[in-house]
Image: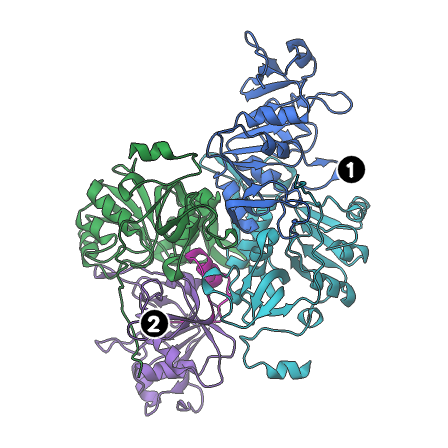
Chain colours: A blue, B purple, C cyan, D green
Amino acid sequence: MLDKNGIAKRIAQELENGWYVNLGIGIPTLIANHVPPGINVTFQSENGILGMGPFPYDGEEDADLINAGKQTITALPGSSIFDSATSFAMIRGQHIQLTVLGAMEISQSGDIANWKIPGKMVKGMGGAMDLVASAENIIVAMTHTNKHGKSKLLKKCTLPLTGVSCVKRVVTNLALIDITKDGFKLIERAPGVSVEQIKESTEGNLIVQGEIPEMDI
Amino acid sequence: MLDKNGIAKRIAQELENGWYVNLGIGIPTLIANHVPPGINVTFQSENGILGMGPFPYDGEEDADLINAGKQTITALPGSSIFDSATSFAMIRGQHIQLTVLGAMEISQSGDIANWKIPGKMVKGMGGAMDLVASAENIIVAMTHTNKHGKSKLLKKCTLPLTGVSCVKRVVTNLALIDITKDGFKLIERAPGVSVEQIKESTEGNLIVQGEIPEMDI
Amino acid sequence: MLAFFHLQYSKMDKRVSSSEAALKGVQDSMTIMLGGFGLCGIPENCIAALVKLGVTNLTCISNNAGVDDFGLGLLLQHRQIKKMISSYVGENDEFERQMLSGELEVDLIPQGSLAARCYAGGAGIPAFYTPAGYGTEVASMKEVRYFNGKPHLLEEALTADFAIVKAWKGDWHGNLVYKGTARNFNPPMAMAGKITIAEVEELVAPGELDPNYIHTPGIFVQRIFQGEKYEKRIEQRTVRSKS
Amino acid sequence: MLAFFHLQYSKMDKRVSSSEAALKGVQDSMTIMLGGFGLCGIPENCIAALVKLGVTNLTCISNNAGVDDFGLGLLLQHRQIKKMISSYVGENDEFERQMLSGELEVDLIPQGSLAARCYAGGAGIPAFYTPAGYGTEVASMKEVRYFNGKPHLLEEALTADFAIVKAWKGDWHGNLVYKGTARNFNPPMAMAGKITIAEVEELVAPGELDPNYIHTPGIFVQRIFQGEKYEKRIEQRTVRSKS
């Protein structure tokens, strides 16, 4: 089973040299800490920066330099700053090679819900709807089940959608799964997790073909 | 009768303090030389500058600083440079208070033709179609008749249009005329020009009400 | 203050004397755009002056709604806002309370569509198509149209009676330069105000800012002043230690 | 040249060795966008390399078509262009001859619509409405729609197989800074290329350009090189005397 950092680490293995990457709030943010050696990627934050660096040293934080999670950050050499209209021009125009975000639910047809629980939580979609509607390569990072033990990989989402037929891959604490036209296709098991466990935790249609390897992380 | 500089000078009297102004190629360009004392306006050139100044001193011309007529220019203190998309955002978004441009024909309903003579001259519309479609205040600067002596103020334009129902006022070598819903309304005569002369040179419907004063320039 | 206005040598000089003077003409029930992302790059001084002015029934267009005791949260506290048009309104308990109780109308818009709609409002583009929000609640009542086989929504431009932005430096003509990610929504919103007010940390004479590096050309700005005081509060102070 | 490529430590390093190397993959019948206004801010070195490469049947999207013996006029001279998409094509006799004789297809577009269509192409906006051209030849075959009582045309985004832009300074990541009015169409076109090539007068290491004053963020640029030689010809030299 993977913890949050494990999920981030597995997704970080997907990064390719030269990619521009947008990381959502939560687990996705941790990916920046696990970029494999030899791989150079540039992180975009949709509030207006390309080339986001690590947190500043204590005492060097700048109120005018934050990421989309409102955290103080730094800018790397070769970075650039721009306004929100330009930032989403990059996103909508598919100039970003990978988008990673969290989710409350995903469906076997690639729908995603992550912005609203009617009557309970209404924080707003922020940039998520623009990201999922435009990105060609979307990976969801989340736990396989919610805190009540219910599966978050569903036949059909129950919560209001953020986007339709957009998620390509999901990495959870239990597995790496691709979304195909026939449903969730199991690609890798998390260390120490059995196919049976993954099946039990997946409400949607899970396709298991042949031997399923354990992740190498 | 006015010469080109006279036409420019009369239009310059229309300028108000604080206006942003776009001047077309030809007679309109001359207006910059006749801004009345005490009036401060800012000239925009649609290739990407606000705060265009006079021509550079001989030897100080810069290939990277031109106006929309491709002439070398200077930039005044407080000027700004921007790209073509932003430039036309200003124009389309009606942030410019006055547009002055030349014309081959105008109609009594405010149509303008100034970009094409089928089979003969096809230079393209440049920024003129954007300017006339968006500007709230358009003055045309032109001669009253063409080189064959034919009126350029028509019931209906014969050449391909640049824009419809957009021209508000025209200043020619003979007169200052407003475009009203009933047609061309004569407001002022050029020095030494009679109402009769203006009538003869105007093919469209010319409205003459009461005494028509001579321009004070 | 009258004396100040008499000293203006031309309307190209857009300086006003204070945040209070900048808000002249702001009335109940108006639509106001406010720049900023979270608490970064918000027009602090104008927000304080709006509280003092006491106008109510405002429609505010702003990416976020501040926090309980800072930013637009201050206007919420004083019940001055009738409707919020935003993309993300977390980090604000009073907001959530007013929204869930129905006291506050809320129009939630995808962040990119919000930015593009402000830009379009300033750029004379009345409407455009975007893929964001297709198949979601956001799409209800909106025209769907396919381009290149992909569904898009028709989104209309946003404008405001007043747009209030915050820049780092500005000159008398209204030319603005922003610093870091405090830029965010300020440039597109500066374009979309019938009257645009800019508050800046440093107001300089024309010619002091390099024309080649102006972020918002002065043509978009009608009033400018140097903010009385900047707190520039940090929402999430995240740091690493030097060791 | 192979050695050069081996030295690249990452794909964030987008340097290529020459205008010739930059054009790798350009083929007959492709659509190419070229920045510049008149002869100001045009990618001189890439145009020369396109002539040398000899590709034909090109569709060129560029505000102007150069003059007879410089800029895009050189590609016209060599009959490499099948179709021009432009807003203004005066100052070029060969162009006029080819167009009137029917050898050259020409699509004339209002300048603001051209800029906005390139921007839209880069920004993932498939189409938008603009008032420009309503009631004219430009409107033929285009959807008309009223917003606020005013007629508008639906205009679709433009993209290109290659966008070629010219900047003043650039770094290895593709971040660009333009100088003066040589900026013009370069930023919106840089956004709209499937592959965007930037030629610059001065190529610097990452970190040398201030992130706060980048005109085109590197994400839009795939290849960059320092131009071999710049003539920067002036089309209309207008001056005043010092006396």
At a point 18% along the width and 55% down the height, the residue shown is: D94
**Chain of the residue under label 1:** A
Q: Position of residue C186 (x, y in %)?
A: 59, 56
A52 vs C104: above or below: above
Q: How many marks?
A: 2
Label of residue C41 in the image: none
Magenta span includes B134: no
The region drawn magenta spans B78-102
At label 2, counting other C-alpha atoms closer than 10 Å, the crowd grade (few under 14, some 14-19, many 20 or more) is many
Quadrant of the rendered structure where residue D68 is? bottom left
Quadrant of the rendered structure where residue A199 is? top right
Residue C54 visible to the viewer? no
Residue C42 visible to the viewer? yes
B50 to the left or right of D49: right
At label 1, counting other C-alpha atoms closer than 10 Å, the crowd grade (few under 14, some 14-19, many 20 or more) is few
Q: Amino acid at mark 2?
A: Gly
**Chain of the residue under label 2:** B
Which element type, helix, strand or loop, lies under badge 1?
loop
Magenta span includes B83: yes
Q: Label 1, label 2: how many angstroms apart (C-alpha)? A: 61 Å
A31 vs D97: above or below: above
In the foreground, D137 or C8: C8
C130 vs B110: above or below: above
- List the residue tagged with mark 1: A119
- List the residue tagged with mark 2: B102
C92 to the left or right of B88: right
